[in-house]
Image: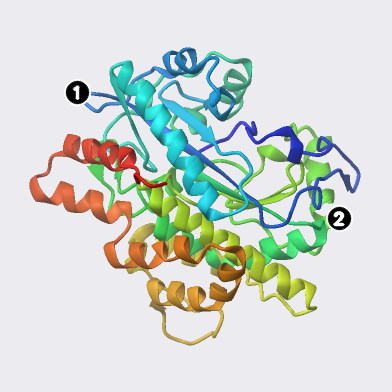
Amino acid sequence: MSITGKQAFPPSITGKGAESTGSVLDHAFGQSDPYTLGVEEEYQLLDETTFDLVQHIETMLDAVAGHELEDRINRELMQSVIEIATPVCRTAGDVMRELTKLRGYVTQVARTNGFRVGSAGTHPFSLFERQRITAKDRYRALIDQMQYVARRELIFGMHVHVAVDDPEKAVKVVNGLLPQLGPLLAMSASSPFWRGEPTGLASSRQMVFSAFPRSGPPPRFRDYSDFADVVGQLERSGCIADYTHIWWDIRLHPRLGTVEIRICDAVTRVEDAVAIAAFCQSLVKRLSEQYEAGEEIPSYHRILTSENKWLAARYGLEAPIMDLQTGRRNRVPIARLVRRTLGEIQPHARELGCERELEGIETILARGSSADGQLRIYNANRDIVEVAREIANATEALPVSA
């Protein structure tokens, strides 16, 4: 999971730098078209024979130097991780094209240099103790500050940015997205293994990252000034350098003018990643229009959204979660709530031109998540290496027509 705060989106959408003084926090909300998208993914660098993690980020970056996609490919905390970031995309179809291009290119570079690429929330068996920290001051400072908590952070995530054109609206959108933490995690879950063992969890990544400060579901803010006051206090007291050191599951990103949805495990299949991006974009549009119409956007106590998130991390798409919208007494299958949400956002997806990509959510519900697939492979013969191999194969299996 990206923890450095570095973003690879083009400066055309970044606006002014985010600097807080008291309750003032500069932002770029409204400086780009609403509902435009950006997606970040973190991939594993794998030995082509053993499928263990390899410390080859510098090899990758040397190989891509001078290429048109160089600025889209970055290092991360550990040398076995590579991060990619799309440019600003208008539609989920654009996201499909950009992710396919980026995945195809890094796969080609990796294979040329004798290794592979995989996308999942955790590696099935590699150990964090054997990973080298990237030789940069910001990473050394993070390790010095976080110690063991950062050293064991061998996890991989996908972040979806959706542009919002007003800071007050963006705060309400984040509040309204909180009930979706469980469904988004269940659909993206891809980390059922940790240190070579099945954990009984669909998303072990969530449990690893929960040790980080300023992580988990965000608090519900009254307005943008309330958010800016909290960030300002953390900065003035020296607890954080800037707001990008707040690692909530969903957060405002003032410098980019986006709502950043960070809850998802790294998604193995590119089609699933695009479907989830379309789901996020449609949700943001629906909530934005509710705000514009003066409608109340329901928001729920952090205890309740955290409980549903835990159930999703434990049981994945089989999770029985609370139906916060209706308040019914009995828990309901998470897939049922996802299908209800699909019905609610369908008109918005149509207006955004992402109906086709959104259909991929039904595919995930019918087929299962990456975590489900990994466990099926493992349960067949208890071969953990085969699980890692199949992660690489599915990551590299790209649509021809994209």
Q: Residue at x 16, y 47 (%)?
A: 378
SS at mark 2 in the image: helix
User: To which residue does mark 2 refer?
Assistant: 225
Q: CA distance from mark 2 to mark 1?
A: 53 Å
Is 215 placed above or below 313 here? above
Q: How many marks?
A: 2
Report the side of 43 relative to 150 (left or right): left
Point out residue 323 in the picture as x, y percentages from the top left corner: 49, 79
The quadrant in which residue 256 appears is: top right
Can residue 398 be seen here? Answer: yes
Is 334 placed above or below 270 here? below
SS at mark 1 in the image: loop
Is 96 placed above or below 55 here? below
Query: For the residue carrying disc 1, how many other residues have a C-alpha within 10 Å: few (<14), some (14-19), or many (20+)?
Result: few
Q: Amino acid at mark 1?
A: Thr
The quadrant in which residue 9 appears is: top right
Q: Residue at x 58, y 54 (%)?
A: 91
In this view, the residue in front, 256 or 99, is: 99
User: To which residue does mark 1 refer?
Assistant: 49
Point out residue 290 in the picture as x, y percentages from the top left corner: 72, 75
Is 337 placed above or below 85 here? below
Report the side of 130 relative to 2 (left or right): left
In this view, the residue in front, 199 or 109, is: 109
